[in-house]
Image: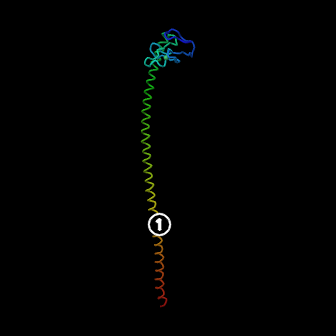
Amino acid sequence: MPINSSSSTSYHSSPNPSVMCLCGIRAPLRTSNSEDNPGRRFFGCINYKEYNGCTYFDWFDPPTCARGMDYGRKMVKKNLALEAQIAELKKTNEAHIAELKKSNESLIEKIEELLTINEEQKHEMEGQRVVIEALMKKSTVHEANWNKMKIALLVLFLVVICMWVKPNDAV
Ligand SMILES: [Zn+2]
């Protein structure tokens, strides 16, 4: 059932009425947040904020009783407080996210730094391993030489003994 714009006393019984406003588009059903009509539904054009905008307006709900008005005002107040709280939490949350991002970036930087140090240490250890291997090789060569020397000394000692013993036998 279409409503004419000047009427503020006709109400709608249909839960989903299709109402056309003055500019020829469907006027959405909205809910009032005002202190005078908390929670009371109305039809209002989406262009009402425009310059020379559509002035179409009509209540959907009948006026609220005193008890309902009181309750509605409390609800609106509570709702506004909750919205403010949500906005504050969003702000805090955003600050936390920014902080976390920052510390995450610094952690990544540190990890990269540690990886670089690790790579450098790997190279250093590889160098030390090569040096140790060379030293071990040298040490093995020295040991083999020393063994040869011991054998030579033993042979020399035996030769000397034999030479010393033979002349005695001859006597
Ligand atoms: Zn309109």
| Secondary structure state at the residue bearing disc 1 | helix
Residue 142: quadrant of the picture: bottom left
How packed is label 1: few (under 14 Cα within 10 Å), some, or many (20 or more)?
few
**How far across and how far down the image is residue 145, in percent?**
46, 72
Q: Examine the rendered structure and indicate whether residue 99 appears above or below residue 158.
A: above
**How far across and how far down the image is residue 40, in percent?**
50, 14
Q: Residue at x 47, y 66 (%)?
A: 137
Which is more toward the observer, 162 or 131?
A: 131
Which is more toward the observer, 162 or 114?
A: 114
Q: Residue at x 47, y 77 (%)?
A: 152
**How far across and how far down the image is residue 93, in percent?**
44, 31
Q: Quadrant of the N terminus?
A: top right
Q: Which residue, given by chain and number where applicable, does mark 1 sit on?
A: 137
Q: Examine the rendered structure and indicate whether residue 155 appears above or below residue 33.
A: below
Left or right position of 26 against 119: right
What amino acid is found at the position of numbered circle 1 in the picture? Lys
Q: Examine the rendered structure and indicate whether residue 59 appears above or below residue 96.
A: above
* The CB of the residue at mark 1 lies under 8 Å from ligand 1: no
| Badge count | 1
**How far across and how far down the image is residue 68, in percent?**
49, 12
Which is more toward the observer, 94 or 23?
A: 23
